[in-house]
Image (cartoon, grey):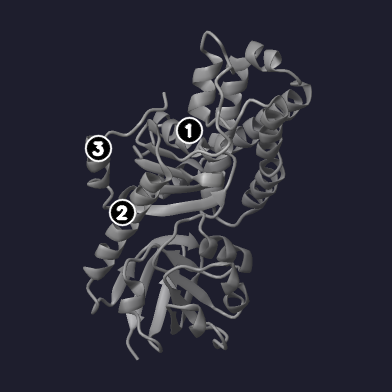
């Protein structure tokens, strides 16, 4: 299944990267991180939006996931609708418990490659379904109304979310079968000589719309640079006099306050309590200042980026993926935002 990108295919792909945005970037085992590709496939099978995705892994398994930003709001609306159905919500909760119990039991019992091969169909189907919910609930828990049912669901998914993927990764390390991504694993288990393919410790992988490629690291970096370049071009074409903007709601809540625009780390120190922090993207060394902020607006990122995760932790509104926002909002402007709808209004100082 894994193949090399031809020069022609490379040019076609680079010409189609206009609307992609970064959703997540993590140091992850390939098997776990490529569950994102399972998510896009199962979302389509459920009748959800047809989502284009790009997944890039560079050396030492540093993975980045990009999605078509134009479809992101459709995904949120679809997930929101599904989880307003209480019967569906109950069925998902029950299914997560069943899948987690199965995988925990399987990883405890699986001590040999032969055991995995003999149980491959059941394992693959259960693991793929589990990883679908693994991503699905990370989005929807922020879009449910704050009710006792939501709290119950969040407690459940966090209880079952954290350890199971780690246990599966450890199982594969114990079996010493290499760092397969899910497509390769399925192909290998169904081949005439299952699990005999040698997988290099470090690889550079590029996944684009259901095609999986192994590429030189320079090519993986080039595709990533191309996405970032097109994002910068989108930013340069924005209307800098705009008074209303729209991005991706990443942490719900409404807030109105004075803007503090940060474009480099030197501007971070001594920000006033309650400001709306406006930046290109946040990183862990922003955490101290984020505690002082009343809300965050970021040019880049998605629902799983650093700004989104930390905002939800601190319970402050956050809107991400707002092209050119640091060149539109000025220091001292009064800004009003809705962290659920992704809407921003600007009142110049």
Image height of 245 relative to 93, above or below:
below
Residue 88 seen in the figure: no
Q: Secondary structure at mark 3?
A: helix
Quadrant of the drawing holding the N terminus: top left
Query: At which x and y percent is residue 130?
Result: 59, 32
Image height of 129 relative to 280, above or below:
above
Q: Secondary structure at mark 2?
A: helix
**Number of other residues with Cα within 10 Å of mark 1, as a class: few under 14, some 14 to 19, many 20 or more:** some
Q: Which residue is mark 2?
A: 226
Residue situated in front as seen by the camera: 174 or 84? 174
Residue drawn at the location 45% of the way across and 35% of the way down:
37
Quadrant of the drawing holding the C terminus: bottom left
Query: At which x and y percent is residue 131?
Result: 57, 35
Residue drawn at the location 70% of the way across and 25% of the way down:
175
Disc number lying in front (3 or 2): 3
Residues marked 3 and 2 touching at CB (< 8 Å): no
Residues marked 2 and 1 touching at CB (< 8 Å): no
Residues marked 1 and 3 touching at CB (< 8 Å): no
Q: Which residue is mark 1?
A: 38
Image height of 19 relative to 233, above or below:
above
Q: Which residue is mark 3?
A: 7
Q: CA distance from mark 2 to mark 1?
A: 25 Å
Q: Is residue 94 left or right of residue 109?
A: left
Query: Which of disc 2 and disc 3 is earlier in sequence?
Result: 3
Disc number lying in front (1 or 3): 3
Most distant residue in the bottom direction = 349
Q: CA distance from mark 1 to mark 3?
A: 27 Å
Query: At which x and y percent is residue 261?
Result: 42, 81
């Amino acid at each position: 299944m894994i193949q090399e990108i031809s020069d022609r295919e490379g040019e076609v792909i680079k010409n189609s990267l206009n609307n992609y945005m970064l959703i997540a970037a993590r140091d992850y085992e390939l098997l776990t991180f490529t569950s994102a590709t399972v998510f896009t496939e199962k979302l389509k099978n459920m009748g959800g939006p047809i989502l284009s995705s790009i997944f890039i892994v560079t050396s030492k398994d540093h993975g980045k996931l990009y999605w078509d930003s134009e479809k992101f709001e459709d995904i949120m609306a679809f997930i929101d609708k599904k989880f307003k159905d209480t019967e569906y919500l109950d069925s998902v909760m029950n299914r997560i418990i069943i899948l987690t119990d199965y995988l925990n039991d399987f990883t405890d019992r699986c001590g040999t490659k032969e055991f995995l091969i003999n149980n491959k169909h059941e394992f693959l189907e259960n693991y793929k379904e589990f990883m679908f919910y693994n991503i699905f609930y990370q989005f929807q828990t922020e879009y449910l109304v704050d009710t006792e049912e939501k709290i119950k669901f969040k407690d459940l998914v966090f209880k079952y979310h954290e350890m199971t993927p780690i246990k599966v990764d450890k199982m594969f390390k114990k079996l010493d079968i290499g760092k397969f991504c899910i497509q390769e694993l399925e192909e290998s288990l169904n081949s005439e000589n299952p699990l005999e393919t040698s997988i290099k410790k470090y690889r550079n992988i590029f996944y684009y719309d259901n095609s999986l490629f192994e590429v030189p690291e320079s090519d993986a970096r080039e595709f990533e640079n191309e996405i970032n370049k097109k994002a910068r071009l989108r930013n340069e074409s924005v209307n800098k006099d705009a008074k209303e903007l729209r991005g991706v709601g990443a942490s719900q809540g409404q807030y109105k306050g004075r803007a503090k625009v940060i474009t480099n780390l030197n501007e971070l120190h001594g920000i006033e309590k309650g400001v709306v922090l406006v930046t290109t993207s946040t990183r862990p060394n922003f955490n101290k200042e984020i505690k002082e902020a009343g809300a965050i607006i970021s040019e880049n990122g998605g629902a799983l980026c650093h700004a989104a995760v930390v905002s939800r932790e601190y319970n402050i509104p956050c809107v991400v993926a707002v092209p050119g926002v640091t060149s539109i909002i000025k220091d001292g402007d009064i800004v009003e935002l809705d962290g659920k709808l992704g809407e921003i209004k600007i009142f110049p100082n």
